[in-house]
Structures are given as C-alpha cells and as structure tokens.
Amino acid sequence: MKQLLNKIELKEWLFQILLLIVIFFLFSFDKHSPDISLDTIVFFMHYALISYIISYVFIPYLFYKKKYKEFGFAIVLTLVYLYISEEFVLEKIFYADKRGKYISNIFFTLLDILPTIVILVGFKLGWDAHKKQVLVDKLKSTVKESELRFLKSQINPHFLFNNLNNLYAYAIEQSPKTPSIILELSSVLRYMLYDCKEDFVLLQSEIEHLKHFTALNELQIENRGEVTFNTSEIPANYIIAPLILLMFIENAFKHSTASQSTNICIKIDIQVNSQGMLNFVCENSFLSNSNNQNLSKGIGLTNVNKRLEMLYPQKYTLEIDNSNQKYKVNLQLQLAKRE
C-alpha cells in the first residue's frame, strides 16, 4: 500500500509540473506580443504559489478534516491578500505608469486572478478524487481476496469433518474397505491442500479430483444404490475456481445416504462446449419424509453461492429443482482459458 501511495505521489508531481507548464503558456499567450515578459512570469508564479498553498495546505489540513469554518476563513483571507498584493504591490512595481495609477474594483481584480487559481486547484481536487478511487478499488480487491481465502478455508475442515466421521464408523466395524477409503481420502486431501492453492485450476485437474471424491463416497454406498459419473473429453486449458463443483456432489451423497438405506441414485454429468460453457448437472434421490428439509441451508451451499457471486458475476446460472424425490442441480458456468 505504501508503494502504491509513493507511486501515486510521483505521478502527481509529474502531472502538476506538466499542468503548470500548459497553464502558464495559456496564461501568457498573446498573439500581439509573443515574447514572455518578466511581469508575466512573476504574476503567474504568484498565482501558482497561492494555488499550491490552497491545494496542499488548506484543502488537506482544513477541508478534508472537515474544518469548514477555518477553511472558509482561510479562503477569505487569501482573497483579501490577493487583492492587496495585486493592487498595491505588483501593479505598482510593474505597471506604475498604467494600471498602478488607480485602484480597481475588488470584483474585477479577483475576476482576473481567480480563473488561473481555480483551474490549478480544481485539477488538484480532481487528482485527489482519482487517488482516493484507486485506494478504494485496491481496498475492495484486498477485501474480496481475503473473503475468498476465508470461504475457501472453510471447505477443507467441512469436508474433513464429514469424511472422518464416516471413516471412524468403518474402522469401528473393521470393514475391509477402510484401506481403500483411506487411500481415496489421501488423494482427495492431497489435491485440496497442495494442488488447488491458486484461485483457479485447470478444469481437467478439477474433474480428476471430483472422480476421486466420487469414488471415495461411492465406497460407502456399497450395494445400496448406483452412482454414475459421466463426462466427455474436456477441452484443454480451461480453468475453474477449485472445489466449487465438489460442494454439490458432497451434498448429493450426504443427503441421499442420510434419507435412504436402499435405491440410492446419484448422477453426475459434466460437459463443456466449444465456447467454454460448462454444464454441470448433479442429481440425487432422497425421501421427502426424511431429514432433507434443510438441504439448501448447509455451510457448503452457502459457501459455494458466495464464491460464485464473487468469482463469476453475471457469468453463471444456477438452477436447483427439489421435487419428485429428486434433488437436481444444474450449473452453467462461462469458463476462461489459462493465459
């Protein structure tokens, strides 16, 4: 953040110097007298000095700190000073035989002085507004990244909690499937801990992870139902935010097995068209008179909805159909390619 501020300050001074040169040439331009005289330089530098005092003293230390009365008083004193210095000092020195012989009305004097000062101060205010917007955008980006990291960090303990409970039950029963479950769980955790640290991963890697995850959960169903995982050839180089699809598959297994002891049916289908549009369908059976009334209220679905909103704004559609003892998720997601 400090480097960003220093970079902005350097750009600001370069901008102010360039602006000062441009305004000076506009101020001093006279088609009848192309030469730049000493009085023109002195008058302009006097106006520029007052502008910088307003811009870098009055505005940051009074106006931005909401000391409006003090700021107003300082501006009034500055206008009085400008009038006195213009009429009783500078004009007496440089135009003693012309304008210096009489004192102009304060309104006409300030009308001649203020345009240059207002332009210089106005550009400073515009630059400050730009600088604040850059910082706001940076802050929003930082907050978004922090929230994404937090949401992603919730996935691992949530997943681990569910599967360790299942593994514990199989270990108590001394099931011969326990070693296979441990092996699949190890593969899944390796991916979650090491391979998906980035915000986006290759879609092909994510699908391989989903296959391992599905195989891990399919071991627990045994002969109580059927699980199908279908995907066609995935185009290369497409990327996706990791662990988003996993939440839907995890919920499908969790709620099917929680409500049914037999006839479990889980279908997963992943397709990607030539334009990079992913179509993900996850369907599972459940019994409506069981404990599935809170199916869409778990931490997993809340998490994935937030991540979709943050990572794919206006680039996805999510439809959930919960009827006829079938829970069907249809997610369409516009993918990007790895650069």
Image (cartoon, rainbow, N blue to C red):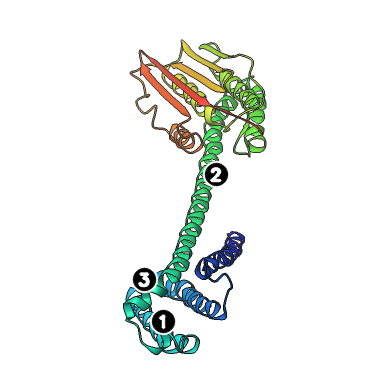
Name the amino acid, label 2. Arg
Whether the residues at callouts 2 and 1 have beta carbons within 8 Å, the answer is no
Is residue 103 depicted above or below 195 in this figure?
Answer: below
Residue at (52%, 31%) from the top-left corner? Answer: 162
Helix or strand or loop: what does disc 1 sit on? helix
| Alpha carbons under labels 2 and 1: distance apart | 56 Å
Is residue 97 depicted above or below 17 in this figure?
Answer: below
Residue 119: name its quadrant: bottom left
Circle 2 is placed at which residue position?
149
* Chain-order first, disc 3 or disc 2: 3
| Alpha carbons under labels 1 and 3: distance apart | 25 Å
Residue at (60%, 35%) from the top-left corner? Answer: 200
Circle 1 is placed at which residue position?
82
- x and y percentages locating residue 46 in the rendered image: 50, 79
* Chain-order first, disc 1 or disc 3: 3
Q: Which quadrant does the N terminus fall into?
A: bottom right
* Chain-order first, disc 2 or disc 1: 1
Badge 3: residue crowd in 10 Å (few <14, some 14–19, many ≥20): few
Name the amino acid, label 3. Lys
- For residue 165, the mark is none
Whether the residues at callouts 3 and 2 have beta carbons within 8 Å, the answer is no
Circle 3 is placed at which residue position?
66
